[in-house]
């Protein structure tokens, strides 16, 4: 059974700081890994998809790395803004997405 | 291009009743998955449908069932509702096969009283 751990559980930073969100998973036999953000009471918004053969993926201020063999992924958010406040979830995909508890980010103006 | 649409957005049901939730995937997507999100258990996989066939199933009791129609729209049904079934139910669609990017709907908030 895939177990996903995200560290830290919560993070509060002033606007402009860079964010580093960590994700670890136990089963490396995955097709890909997705990062999502979730605003309170809402659905999940896909941020980045990294295929199992890739090491890194970038979209705007977001960069995610994947080390499949060690079961780790890291999401970097550059120059954080208050609008980045949300819960961030990583989800390795074997035949289904498995989720950890997420990292709740607060960016203070 | 329209996103994933879930209806209804909110539901209040009584214990013992049954409920049906609907999910319309992104046009052209053939895979639909369902997830349950609760404060205690987080996000858990219910089942996945691909081309009208249930391809994978999570660890939920038989009261939870689903189906997919020829136009890829999917429904999930929960019978004999329990208080613990109160949750946000999320549907995700992807284009064709395992390994494709998943897109989620806004969810249906089910409250069982």
Image: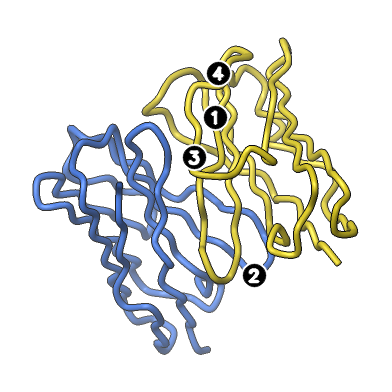
Front-most of B102 and B18? B18
The residues tagged by marks 2 and 3 sit, at their Cα atoms, a distance apart of: 25 Å
Q: Position of residue A33 (x, y in %)?
A: 32, 44
Q: Chain of mark 3?
A: B
Front-most of B108 and A84? B108
Residue contact between numbered discs 3 and 1, judged by CB atoms under 8 Å: no
Q: Chain of mark 4?
A: B
Q: Chain of mark 2?
A: A
> Label 2: which residue?
A40
Which of label 4 and label 3 is nearer to you? 3
Q: Position of residue A108 (x, y in %)?
A: 50, 89
Residue under disc 3 on the same chain as residue under disc 1:
yes
Front-most of B35 and B66? B66
Residue under disc 2 on the same chain as residue under disc 3:
no
> Label 4: which residue?
B50
A73 sits left or right of B76 in the view: left
The residues tagged by marks 2 and 4 sit, at their Cα atoms, a distance apart of: 30 Å
Is label 3 in a helix, a strand or a loop?
A: loop
Q: Is residue A100 above or below residue A40?
A: above
Is label 2 in a helix, a strand or a loop?
A: loop
Q: Which mark is residue A8?
A: none
Q: Which residue sits at x=85%, y=44%?
A: B18
> Label 3: which residue?
B58
> Label 1: which residue?
B48
């Amino acid at each position: 059974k895939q177990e996903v751990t995200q560290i830290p559980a919560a993070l509060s930073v002033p606007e402009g700081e860079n964010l580093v969100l960590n994700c670890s998973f136990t089963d490396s036999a995955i097709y890909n890994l997705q990062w999502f953000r979730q605003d309170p009471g809402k659905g999940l918004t896909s941020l980045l998809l990294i295929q199992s053969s890739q090491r890194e993926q970038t979209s705007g201020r977001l960069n995610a790395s994947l080390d499949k063999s060690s079961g780790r992924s890291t999401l970097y958010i550059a120059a954080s803004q208050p609008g980045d406040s949300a819960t961030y979830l990583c989800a390795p995909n074997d035949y289904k997405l498995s989720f950890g508890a997420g990292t709740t980010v607060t960016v203070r103006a | 291009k329209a996103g994933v649409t879930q209806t209804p957005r909110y539901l209040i049901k009584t214990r013992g009743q049954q409920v049906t939730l609907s999910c319309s995937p992104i046009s052209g997507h053939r895979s639909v998955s369902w997830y349950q999100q609760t404060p205690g258990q987080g996000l858990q996989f219910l089942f996945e449908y691909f081309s009208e066939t249930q391809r994978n199933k999570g660890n939920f009791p038989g009261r939870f069932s689903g189906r997919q129609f020829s136009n890829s729209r999917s429904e999930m049904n929960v019978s004999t509702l329990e208080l613990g079934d109160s949750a946000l139910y999320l549907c995700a669609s992807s284009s064709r096969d395992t390994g494709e990017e998943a897109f989620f709907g806004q969810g249906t908030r089910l409250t069982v009283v």
